[in-house]
Image (tube, rainbow, N blue to C red):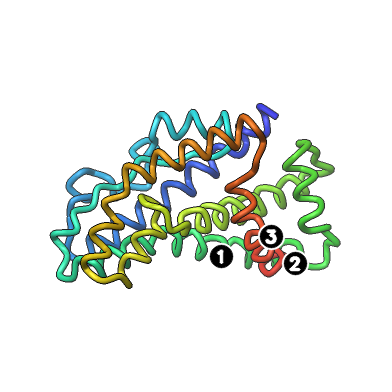
Amino acid sequence: MILLMLIQLPILLFTLTIHEVSHGYVAFLLGDDTAKRAGRLTLNPISHIDPLGLIMLFIVRIGWAKPVPINPYNFQNYKRDTAITAAAGPAANFLMAILIAIIFRIFTAGSGYNGLQQFFVSLNYGKFFSFGDFINFLMMFTIFINLALGLFNLIPVPPMDGSKILGGFLSDEAYSKYTAKERQGAKLLLIIFALNYIFRLNLIGGLIIPPLIFLMQLLVG
């Protein structure tokens, strides 16, 4: 399992990096150069590593990167552009999943690869039956983790991206009250992570796994 996690780590770091850079780049296009001045518009994963998020990734298999700094007061439209910037991260992950799925479809055409079933055998037990099976696993894991990260970030709990996207549709008063809950929301998520790990409740998984499996079936068959 340690070897399997070491195999997965570069893909996880790259996925988190794409997510954060997308936030910063879209913010830059909308008039906020905070991320650029902070040196965060880079594909170097080291610039985006959050030590606690990396540790949690190994312990509970759910981690996070260091958020890209955004100053919404540089936007022409505070709520709208904040929502667009927030949506950029999940959108980039979904786009990456689609692109890798196209390559996967081409690579496995006519090979008889047993799709999701074989992928989850490899994911849970680290079993690979051939070099081609290993390459298939890497592509499917890249699709899997991009979809999972995109769906996870759409949860409308502050400070998740989903809360900022939802905020773009709220009134100014409701928006201010909602986004003021970021600190409480972050604590709530950490508590949920802890309960997930201690009691094996799968609270997050129960929310995102059904759409995740549906999208995996849609993309890879």
Q: Quadrant of the N terminus?
A: top right
- Residue 79: % across, % down: 24, 67
* Quarter holding residue 163: bottom left
- Residue 60: % across, % down: 58, 33
Residue at 82% from the left image edge and 44% from the top image edge:
130
**Residue that badge 2 annotates:** 221
- Residue 63: % across, % down: 49, 39
| Amino acid on which the number 3 mark rests in the picture | Ile
| Amino acid on which the number 1 mark rests in the picture | Leu
Which numbered disc, 3 or 1, marks the residue closer to the eye? Answer: 3
**Residue that badge 3 annotates:** 213
| Amino acid on which the number 2 mark rests in the picture | Gly
- Residue 200: % across, % down: 67, 36
Residue at 62% from the left image edge and 36% from the top image edge:
7
Side of 212 relative to 49 (left or right): right
* Quarter holding residue 168: bottom left
Which numbered disc, 2 or 3, marks the residue closer to the eye? Answer: 3
SS class, disc 2 = loop
Q: Which mark is residue 99?
A: 1
**Tags 3 and 1 touching, CB below 8 Å:** no
Q: Earlier in the sequence, mark 3 or mark 1?
A: 1
Residue at 46% from the left image edge and 59% from the top image edge:
154
Q: Earlier in the sequence, mark 2 or mark 3?
A: 3
Residue at 19% from the left image edge and 66% from the top image edge:
78
Whether residue 145 is situated above or below residue 51 in the rendered picture = below
Distance, label 3 to label 1, CA atoms, is 18 Å
Q: Earlier in the sequence, mark 1 or mark 2?
A: 1
